[in-house]
Image: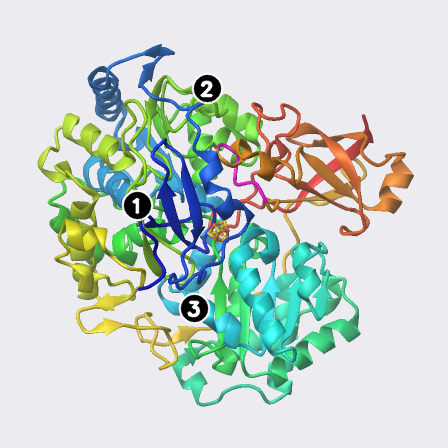
C-alpha cells in the first residue's frame, strides 16, 4: 500500500454502503482531518460531501457520556445490573419471546455478532431485527429465492467495465455518491457507454442518463417482465447457461402475460430500453431502495435477476445485478445473521442442521426454532404489550419506522426500554428508561462490509468520551450478568472477529457462500493491520465474482427464475388522499441527522424539510413556492416547505426522511408512511404512501 502520510490512520467512512476508505489524522485536540484513501478499492481516494465532512461531526456538545436510569446519572454497574435483571425477569415470567433487540446497519460486525449471539443463542429468541430491514431485506429474500443464498454476485469494478448500466430505484448521485463518481468517470472515458435510470422521479442521477424511464411507482416488475419477453424474442437467451437455471419457461410464460401499460411509459421508450439491453452483453443492473422499499420488493428483485439469469450475464466482468445497500454495514449484519429470520454466516435458522451446528459451536443453551419478529411486527408487539423489555441500539425507530407516531407511542408505553446511543437527543433516546453511552465513528474499532463484499477496518482515532463504551462490550457485559460468562468473555474485538471466522469454517461444511475462514488466526496486530479484502476468503484464496461457473447454493446447485407479476402499491390513491408520496434521502444528510447536522457545510445544501410538488398540482391547490404545505396521510401529518418542481410528475410528491422532532417538529415524514410490508421480506413500502396536500 502507498500514499499514507505520517500520523494518518486508515479507517472507513460510516455514511453509506459504498464503504469508502478514509485516511484520518488526529490533530491532538480531539479533532481530525480526513482525505480519501487512494489505496481503498471502493473509492481510490475519492470522497463525497459527507465523507469530506467527517471531521466536522465529532464535537462532544451533545454526547451522552455516562449511563442514565430514569433520567438520573448512574454507575455502569447499576445500569447494567438493572438491564440484566429486567431482561432476565421478563424471560422468566413470559418466556424468551417477551424481549427484543432492535439494532442497526451502522453497528460494526463485531457489535452485531455479539448482539445476535446473545439473543439467538443464549436468550433463546430470534427477536433481533435491524433497521436494515427498512433498507435491503427484499434483496436478501430475492437473492435467496434465486441463488439459494444471499450472495451479491459482482463488484464495483463491474460498473466501470459495463457497456450498459441500468440504475433502478437508485439515486446514486446522492445516496452512493462515490459510486456515481466512478460511473461518471467511466462514461467520460468511454462515451459510448449507455446509462438508463428507472425511477418515477427525475433525480440528480438522471443528469448522467441516456434514457430516463419515469415509470409508475411499483411497476418495475412489469417493465422487467417486458424485458424478459424481449430477451427471448431477440434471441439473447443463453441456452448453455440455462442448464444451470430452473424456472425459465414458467417465468417467461408469466412475463408474457404482463401488460406493459401499467408502467405508464410510452411503448417507444420501453422498446428502446429492451433493445439496448438485448443487444448489449455487458450489462450491470444496479438497484437500491426504490426496488426494495415496496410491498412487491422481493418480486422486483427477482424480475431483475430473471433477466440476468436468462442471459447468463451474471458473475462475469461487467455483467450482473448489483444491490447497493444504504447503510455502511448492512452487509456485515447479513453475514452475522442480524435479521430476525437469519442465522450467522448465511446459515438458516429454519434448517435443523445449521441450527444444531451453531448451537454446538456457541455451546448455547437455547436456540430458537423459528424466525423472530421482523421490524414492523416487532413494534406491533411492543405496542400490544407482548414485548416487555426492548433494547434499541444505535438507531432511531421513533423517527425512521413507518407510522412513526404509532411506533413512538409504542416505545413510550413499553414496560422497559434500553437505548444505547452516542447522544440522548434522539427522539428514541428520550423514551428510554435506561440510556447507555456508546462510542461512535472515530472511537469504535472493528470491521464493516460494503456492498461489494469488501471487509474493511474501522479504526479508533480518538479516545472514548467520558464513560462511553463499545457496543460489543456493553452487550457482552450484560450477557455475563445474565449468567453466560464464558460465552461473552471478550476483551478485544479481534477475539470476536476470530470467533466469527471460526464459525464461518463451520458454515463451510454446508458449502455455503459466506466464508472468511482464511482469516482465522489473526492476532491483535494482524487484525489491526487487516487490509480491505473481499469475501469469500478461504485458506486457498478469494473469489472476485460468484456464479460465472453456473454453481449456485440451492439444493441441486441450480439457480431459480421466479414467475412474478406486477402488483400495485398496497395503498391506492383516492379522493381523500389523491397524491402518491415518495420518500428518500438528500445528498448531505445521513439518516436522522444525529451526526451530519453538526457540520455547517452539510446543513447548507438543503437546510429544512421540504416537499417537491409538480407546478400544475401546486397551481391547482394554490401552493406558492417556498410556502408551507400541510401533508396528511391515514397515519400522520407533517408541515413541509413547498418546492415547486417538475422533477416529480403530476400526482406524485417527494419528501426527504431525515428530520426529527428535535430538528423539525413538523417534518417527521415517516409518520406519513403506512406500515404495509412485502409478504416475504417484511420490508415496509416507504415510497408509496398516499397523502393529501393543503396550503398551510
Ligand atoms: Fe462515505 Fe458513502 Fe460518501 Fe463514500 S460515498 S464518502 S462511504 S458517504
Q: Residues within 10 Å of mark 1 (few under 14, many from 20)?
A: some
Of the two numbered discs 3 and 1 in the rendering, the one whose residue sits closer to the viewer: 1
Q: Where is residue 388 shown, x and y percent of the image?
A: 34, 23
Of the two numbered discs 2 and 3 in the rendering, the one whose residue sits closer to the viewer: 3
Q: Quadrant of the N terminus?
A: bottom left
Magenta span of residues: 588-594
- What residue is rendered at 55% in x and 30% in y? 404
- What residue is rendered at 52% in x and 45% in y? 50
Secondary structure mostly seen in magenta is loop
C-alpha span from label 2 to label 1: 29 Å
- Marks 2/1 in contact by CB < 8 Å: the verdict is no
Name the one closer to the observer, 557 or 189: 189
Where does label 2 land, which residue?
A: 430
Mark 3 and mark 1 lie on one chain; the one further toward the N terminus is 3
Q: Residues within 10 Å of mark 2 (few under 14, many from 20)?
A: some
Is 262 situated above or below 393? below
Q: Going by the image, does 443 lie left or right of 573?
A: left
- Marks 2/3 in contact by CB < 8 Å: the verdict is no
Residue 355 shows up from this direction:
no
Which residue, as the protein is rendered here, is positioned at the far left?
486
Q: Going by the image, does 70 lie left or right of 656?
A: left
Q: Secondary structure at mark 1?
A: loop
Tell me if residue 312 is in the magenta stretch.
no
Mark 2 and mark 3 lie on one chain; the one further toward the N terminus is 3
Q: Quadrant of the C terminus?
A: top right
Name the one closer to the observer, 123 or 441: 441
Q: How many marks?
A: 3
Q: Where is residue 575 shown, x and y percent of the image?
A: 81, 39
Where does label 1 land, which residue?
A: 459
Amino acid at each position: 500500500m502507498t500514499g499514507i502520510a505520517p500520523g494518518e490512520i486508515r479507517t472507513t467512512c460510516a455514511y453509506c454502503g459504498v464503504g469508502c476508505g478514509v485516511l484520518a489524522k488526529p490533530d491532538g485536540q480531539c479533532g481530525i482531518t480526513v482525505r480519501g484513501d487512494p489505496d481503498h478499492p471502493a473509492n481510490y481516494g475519492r470522497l463525497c460531501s459527507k465523507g469530506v465532512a467527517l471531521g466536522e461531526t465529532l464535537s462532544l456538545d451533545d454526547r451522552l457520556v455516562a449511563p442514565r436510569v430514569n433520567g438520573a446519572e448512574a454507575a455502569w454497574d447499576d445500569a447494567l445490573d438493572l438491564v440484566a435483571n429486567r431482561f432476565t425477569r421478563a424471560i422468566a415470567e413470559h418466556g424468551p419471546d417477551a424481549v427484543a433487540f432492535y439494532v442497526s446497519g451502522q453497528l460494526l460486525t463485531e457489535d452485531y455478532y455479539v448482539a445476535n449471539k446473545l439473543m439467538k443463542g443464549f436468550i433463546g429468541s430470534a427477536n433481533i431485527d435491524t433497521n436494515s430491514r427498512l433498507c435491503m431485506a427484499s434483496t436478501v429474500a430475492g437473492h435467496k429465492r434465486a441463488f439459494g443464498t444471499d450472495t451479491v454476485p459482482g463488484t464495483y469494478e463491474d460498473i466501470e467495465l459495463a457497456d450498459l448500466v441500468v440504475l433502478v430505484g437508485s439515486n446514486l448521485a446522492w445516496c452512493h455518491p462515490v459510486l456515481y463518481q466512478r460511473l461518471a468517470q467511466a462514461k467520460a472515458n468511454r462515451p459510448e457507454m449507455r446509462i438508463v435510470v428507472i425511477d418515477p422521479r427525475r433525480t440528480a442521477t438522471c443528469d448522467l442518463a441516456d434514457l430516463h424511464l419515469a415509470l409508475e411507482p411499483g411497476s418495475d416488475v412489469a417493465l422487467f417482465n417486458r424485458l424478459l419477453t424481449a430477451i427471448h424474442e431477440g434471441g439473447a437467451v443463453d441456452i448453455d447457461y440455462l442448464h444451470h437455471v430452473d424456472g425459465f419457461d414458467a417465468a417467461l410464460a408469466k412475463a408474457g402475460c404482463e401488460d406493459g401499460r401499467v408502467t405508464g411509459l410510452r411503448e417507444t421508450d420501453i422498446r428502446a430500453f429492451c433493445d439496448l439491453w438485448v443487444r448489449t452483453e455487458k450489462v450491470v443492473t444496479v438497484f437500491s431502495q426504490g426496488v426494495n422499499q415496496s410491498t412487491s420488493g422481493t418480486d422486483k428483485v427477482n424480475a431483475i435477476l430473471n433477466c440476468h439469469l436468462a442471459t447468463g450475464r451474471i458473475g462475469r466482468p461487467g455483467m450482473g445485478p448489483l444491490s447497493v445497500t444504504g447503510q455502511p454495514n448492512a452487509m456485515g449484519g447479513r453475514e452475522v445473521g442480524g435479521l430476525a429470520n437469519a442465522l450467522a454466516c448465511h446459515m438458516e435458522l429454519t434448517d435443523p442442521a445449521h441450527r444444531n451446528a451453531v448451537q454446538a459451536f456457541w455451546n448455547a443453551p437455547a436456540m430458537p426454532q423459528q424466525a423472530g419478529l421482523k421490524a414492523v411486527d416487532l413494534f406491533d408487539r411492543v405496542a400490544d404489550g407482548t414485548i416487555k423489555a426492548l433494547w434499541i441500539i444505535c438507531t432511531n425507530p421513533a423517527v425512521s419506522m413507518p407510522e412513526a407516531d404509532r411506533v413512538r407511542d409504542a416505545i413510550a408505553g413499553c414496560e422497559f426500554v434500553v437505548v444505547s446511543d452516542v447522544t440522548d437527543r434522539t427522539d428514541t433516546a428520550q423514551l428510554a428508561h435506561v440510556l447507555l453511552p456508546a462510542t461512535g465513528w472515530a472511537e469504535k474499532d472493528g470491521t464493516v462490509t460494503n456492498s461489494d463484499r469488501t471487509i474493511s477496518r474501522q479504526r479508533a482515532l480518538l479516545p472514548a468520551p467520558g464513560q462511553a463504551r463499545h457496543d460489543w462490550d456493553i452487550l457482552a457485559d450484560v450477557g455475563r450478568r445474565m449468567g453466560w460468562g464464558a460465552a461473552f468473555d471478550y476483551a478485544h474485538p479481534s477475539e470476536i472477529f476470530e470467533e466469527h471466522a471460526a464459525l464461518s469454517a463451520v458454515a463451510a461444511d454446508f458449502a455455503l457462500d459466506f466464508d472468511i475462514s482464511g482469516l482465522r488466526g489473526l492476532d491483535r496486530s494482524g487484525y489491526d493491520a487487516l487490509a480491505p479484502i473481499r469475501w469469500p476468503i478461504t485458506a486457498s484464496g478469494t473469489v472476485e465474482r460468484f456464479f460465472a461457473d453456473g454453481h449456485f447454493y440451492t439444493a441441486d446447485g441450480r439457480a431459480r427464475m421466479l414467475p412474478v407479476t406486477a402488483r400495485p402499491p398496497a395503498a391506492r390513491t383516492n379522493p381523500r388522499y389523491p397524491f402518491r408520496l415518495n420518500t428518500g434521502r438528500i445528498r448531505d444528510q445521513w439518516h436522522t441527522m444525529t451526526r451530519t447536522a453538526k457540520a455547517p457545510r452539510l446543513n447548507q445544501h438543503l437546510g429544512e424539510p421540504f416537499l417537491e410538488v409538480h407546478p400544475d398540482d401546486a397551481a391547482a391547490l394554490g401552493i406558492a413556492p417556498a410556502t408551507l404545505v400541510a401533508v396528511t396521510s391515514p397515519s400522520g401529518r407533517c408541515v413541509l416547505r413547498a418546492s415547486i418542481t417538475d422533477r416529480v410528475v403530476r400526482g406524485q410528491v417527494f419528501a426527504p426522511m431525515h428530520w426529527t422532532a428535535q430538528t423539525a417538529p413538523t417534518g417527521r415524514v415517516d409518520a406519513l408512511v403506512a406500515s404495509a410490508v412485502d409478504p416475504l421480506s417484511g420490508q415496509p413500502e416507504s415510497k408509496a404512501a398516499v397523502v393529501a396536500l393543503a396550503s398551510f
